[in-house]
Image: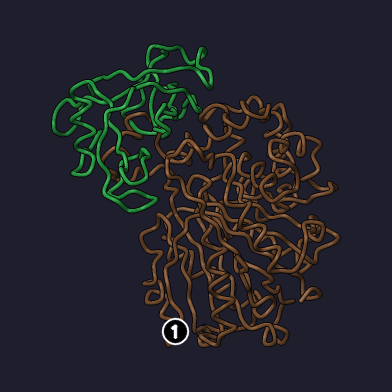
Amino acid sequence: MPLPDAVSQPFFDAAAAGRLAIQHCPACDRHIAPTRPRCPWCAHPPEWRQVSGAATLYTFAVVHQVLHPGLHDRVPYATALVDLAEGVRLHAQLVDVEASEIRIGMPLTVCFRTVPSDTGPITIPYFRPA
Amino acid sequence: MNQRFPRGAAAIVGLGVTPMGKIYGRSAADFAGEAIASALSDAGLTPHDVDGLLVNTNNAPDMTALLQLSLGLEDLTIVNGMGAYGSTVGTMLQYAAFAIEAGLANTIVLVYADAPLAEGGRAGASYVRPRPVTGVDSLRAVYGNIGANPGYAMAARLHMDRFGTTSEQLGAIAVAQRRWATMNPAAQMRTPITIEDHQTSRFIAEPLRLLDCCLVSNGAVAVVVTAADRARDLRQPPVPILAAAQAAPGDTGSTDAEPYLYTGARVSGRAALAMAEITLDDVQLLELYDCYTYTVLVTLEDYGFCAKGEGGSFVQDGRLGPGGTLPTNTGGGQLSGYYMWGMTPLAEAVIQLRGQAGERQVADHDVALVSGNGGLLGFHATIVLGSAAAA
């Protein structure tokens, strides 16, 4: 279940508004992912920037094992790593595509879905073929 | 960077390995006590001799420095719970060697123990323990990426896509290691398997199949480390520690880096060979951390036994198995022997270097390269051990 915290709240706020926001270091002019309290290269406090949502598929796996009781009805499913155009790699899940059609390098774009959480429905990003 | 090491100053003088696998009703600390008693007896030493204790921290709540108190050890000058996941054993040996050489302690016990299996549970399920995480990282579980299996599967998929590695080539690793395990009385899996068995074993997370994934074990392994000159007077042939190096390249999330393909083995391997004053050609035994077949393949590449991307064709002729040119995981490893993190490859190296491996003894057994791998390929350690003749 998604558990937003103080550092990542802007990420979830942006997702609720249908936007993908990623941290950015103004000193290094580089994007940072996943959320970190400080820039990993220069320790400057990061700012948040909306990004394009464009990505390519870096790699994926089709999971058959039931890793959590809540996933019992979803196996097999594909979990993925995607490379954003802005130069960072995110954990993700693909939607609107059959597992047999997934290809490393395929162009993707962000979309948003609502999932349950302890504090009510929460909107999070997924990726679909572009 | 010029990393120095007190090559040969310390040696492994005792080894204790408990029965392994589906042994229920005992805690990790209980297994640890048994392994330590066995290791001390093996060395011809007693608890009174012990003045150092290093505990590999893991998922077991009783594997901390507090183990000293449950064991009742007194007057320690080195004690710690150390944690770098699957690479920890290499780091414990590194610390122990320097501590012995500096006179901080005389007799240091290193231990790994775990008891994740409970009666009635399934092995794989028992080992998935979702950590409470928050923030963007909490989405990994929402995306179904829980535990280690999906991440390693993604790494293997990437390697296959980039370099043409096949599932059958991963299977060659599993088959070779099972051949060693059939000759190891301590191994959990002793029935031979074929490539076809590997190919028909069920998918865990594609492309990884059941036979690509390591075992889960209840049990413990302990070793005793002392100064080399003292080692010569004890019960067993000493196993000198010739090198121990660590590397953790990190993962900043930048698309510039590919830590699933280029691991810390590149750095720790090079450092360890330099510390030990050897080259790859001098290595006669390979005991590699094998949480997955893929881990063995990428480690072979990153150590330089073959070029990046060629690991599949390198292993497919079975050279890692009995009678092959590169004996690897000669007790069956974590895939077929038992899963005690970094103690699995270390224990087998000690047995082989002592010449005590019986039916599976490798004829030339003077230099062993031992790897540790933790997290998602992110924490690496390389150890070089020698036989008594190599000291």
Q: Which residue does the image show at 73% across and 36% down from the upper left? A: B310
Q: In the figure, A105 relative to A49: above or below?
A: above
Q: Which chain is green?
A: A
Q: Which chain is brown?
A: B
The residue at which mark 1 appears reads as: B76
Q: Is residue A63 left or right of residue B272?
A: left
The quadrant of the rendering that contains the N terminus of chain B is bottom right
The chain holding disc 1 is: B
| B374 or B189, nearer to the observer | B374
Residue A10: percent from left, percent from top: 20, 35
Q: Is residue B268 visible?
A: yes
Q: In the figure, B221 relative to B258: above or below?
A: below
Residue A11: percent from left, percent from top: 24, 33
| B251 or A24, nearer to the observer | A24
| B152 or B265, nearer to the observer | B265
Q: Is residue B340 visible?
A: no
| SS at circle 1 | loop
Number of numbered tags placed on the structure image? 1
Q: In the figure, B75 relative to A58: above or below?
A: below
Tell me which corner region of the image, top left, top right, bottom left or bottom right, holds residue B206: top right
Query: Which class describes the residues within 10 Å of circle 1: few (<14), some (14-19), or many (20+)?
Result: some
